Image (tube, coloured by chain):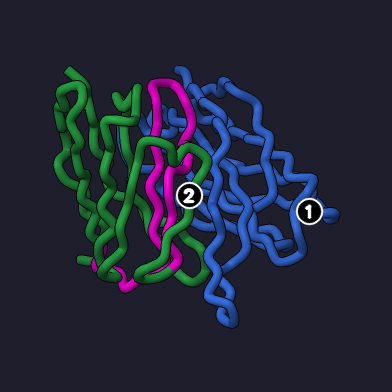
Amino acid sequence: DGGITQSPKYLFRKEGQNVTLSCEQNLNHDAMYWYRQDPGQGLRLIYYSQIVNDFQKGDIAEGYSVSREKKESFPLTVTSAQKNPTAFYLCASTSERNTIYFGEGSWLTVV
Amino acid sequence: DAKTTQPPSMDCAEGRAANLPCNHSTISGNEYVYWYRQIHSQGPQYIIHGLKNNETNEMASLIITEDRKSSTLILPHATLRDTAVYYCIVSAPRSSYTGTASKLTFGTGTRLQVTL
């Protein structure tokens, strides 16, 4: 079945460490997105990519980095510059009609 | 992408219709209205979308005003399993000419609580 796979589901990070969240899709979608969600809050856009080797900053890109070397993959790195990284992270991709497909999310906790 | 405004929360009795409003007064002519819902700690789920005509599927109905500045999502017979946060977003389809994808900005949504 086609879909979006995020891993890991749960991740713990020590302060000062970089961590990378994986997002893989087999839907043949060009556009992919990363969102952050804090408890009781809506989704905030971190980065998005329209096509391979291209990506744009969203509303809260500081402290994050991405790459888009392959159409299927859009990993998100949470760097040590992100001062409050504990959150729920969602990866998404869109069909040409803009229907959004989401992964199941990754929980990141700073310990 | 146009901005949307939704009430932060709503209650609905089980078995009754839930009507969730959304304002999108700055919507452009080529932007669609999409509705998603999110149950706690899961990825949001697609519900329905439309451009200007009313739409219905097995989950819900979407009513878009004639001026397209607002819309209402209707869950005809709400159940406890419909308790979730509902998001309304507007965006244009990916341009086949420029290849440009929409930014897809979500608001804070409406928390619908269905009660017995």
Instruction: Point out the stretch of residues depicted in magenta.
Output: A25-50
x and y, in percent, of residue B56 in the image: 58, 57
x and y, in percent, of residue A27 in the image: 30, 69
Supply the letter of whichever chain is blue: B
Residue type, label 2: Lys
In the image, farthest residue toward the right: B67
Which residue is pictured at 26% across the width and 44% down the height?
Answer: A77
In the image, farthest residue toward the bottom: B97
- The chain that hosts pointer 1 is B
| Residue B43 part of the magenta-drawn span | no
Which residue is pictured at 67% across the width and 40% down the height?
Answer: B4
Q: Main secondary structure of the magenta part?
A: strand
Q: Is residue B76 visible?
A: no
To which residue does mark 2 refer? A57
Q: Secondary structure at mark 2?
A: strand
Q: Within the image, what quadrant is residue B106 found in? A: top right
Q: Nearer the viewer, residue A46 or A90?
A: A46
Give the quadrant of the C terminus of chain B.
top left
B94 on left or right of A51: right
B50 on left or right of B108: right
To which residue does mark 1 refer? B68
Q: Nearer the viewer, residue B30 or A84?
A: A84
Residue type, label 1: Arg
Q: Within the image, what quadrant is residue A30 found in? A: bottom left
- The chain that hosts pointer 2 is A
Name the front one of labels 1 and 2: 2
- Give the answer, above or below, for where B87 lies relative to B58: above
The Cα–Cα distance between marks 1 and 2, rounded to whole angstroms, is 29 Å
x and y, in percent, of residue A16 in the image: 20, 26
